[in-house]
Image (cartoon, rainbow, N blue to C red):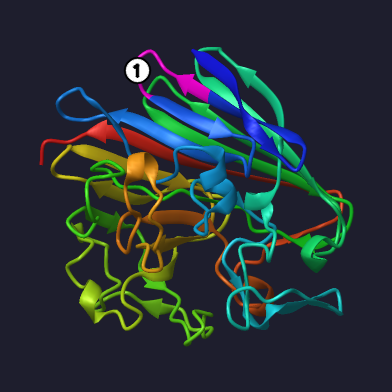
Amino acid sequence: MINKTDWGFFDGYKINLITLKNKNGMSVSLTNYGASAVDLCVPDKNGDFIDVLLGYDDLDGYINGKSCQGASIGRYGNRIGGAKFKLNGEEYILRKNNGENSLHGGIVGYHRRVWRTLGVSDGKDASAAFVYTSPDGEENFPGEVNIFIEYTLTEENSLKIKYSAVSDRDTVLNLTNHSYFNLGGYNSGDILNARMQIFAENYTPVDNGLIPTGEIASVKNTPFDFTEPKLIGKDIKSIDIGGYDHNFILGEPGITRKAAVACDFNTGIEMTVYTDMPAMQFYTGINLNEANGKKGSAMGKFAGFCLETQYSPNTPNMPHFPQCVLKKGEEFRSETEYAFSVTGS
């Protein structure tokens, strides 16, 4: 089932809210402002439906928000150190919006753009697709890039996000989704007692600006070891920045794998992440500080966590990382799936 309504205007463009619902009652609401996920209601162990996404009640919240809630991120998700990189011998100077670095595409990333709703499909698995043409020179990234993002809600209670893009010049591209999850519900308190498992043997240590040092380090015997399930809060006090905002290495790009499993004991909701991206940023909302969340709920530190499938941060300046260069005329494709179930333990 699909419901599409008008949700307001931004810069003269009409903004829509599209709700997809499957036969099990699970639903997701999406908007073409930032190609964002607004809510995601999944069944808990009692059969009640819980909205597991942080966010806002109305369009103004997303326009004025500071934390990219539910949004599609680009042209480059995560950080580029020094806000500059070289490609084909030419240096590109980006605008700094995170200390000395460029973060999530710059001052006006894709999360603050109006996307065109390409279409919705009410077939066996309901879907909605959004497109955006990023002009050559936007935030000083090279190439005009046509981007397509499709959200699909399956009958098996999973949300799939498919990405594709084509550029008319060589460019760098790192697309991701910035949803904040709380599997106890958006207003259920912090996520420190949620259980997390991340299928990564290595992570990338960072400097004071959260830029990878270049080292690919083992998680073994560190607070970053989630190879066995553990509570998010178990080792969090050992992290010098006050929580997790770190990149985990999953493997080579283009190979779909299980990346993470998270679970809330109170609701019994379990979420499994699958992706073909080579890395994933685990972020525990250490900088969240917004009072205008859904139904008046505050979104403070540890209110939710992000699992952002991606290329590693600062990849354009790290030649030994799997590279994110999109060649002229070639098509980028990727898919990430968030699959939901109920567990009894």
How many numbered discs, if any? 1
Position of residue 310 measured from the top left corner of the image (x, y, whole percent): 55, 58
Q: Is residue 21 magenta?
A: yes
Question: Is 238 displayed left or right of 124 in the figure?
Answer: left
* Residue 2 visible somewhere in the drawing: yes
Element marked by disc 1: loop
Magenta residues, dominant SS class = loop
* Residue 53 visible somewhere in the drawing: no
Please give the range of residues in magenta: 19-26
Position of residue 214 measured from the top left corner of the image (x, y, whole percent): 54, 83
Q: Residue at x 36, y 47 (%)?
A: 181
Q: Amino acid at mark 1?
A: Gly
Counting other residues with Cα less than 10 Å from the Cα at mark 1, is it few (<14), some (14-19), or many (20 or more)? some
Position of residue 180 measured from the top left corner of the image (x, y, whole percent): 40, 50
Which quadrant would residue 231 be assigned to in this image?
Answer: bottom left
Relative to 46, say whether 112 is above or below. Answer: below
Using the image as rendered, state which of residue 41 and residue 319 is in the foreground: 41
Q: Is residue 117 magenta?
A: no
Residue that numbered label 1 is attached to? 25
Q: Residue at x 73, y 79 (%)?
A: 84
Q: Residue at x 21, y 53 (%)?
A: 194
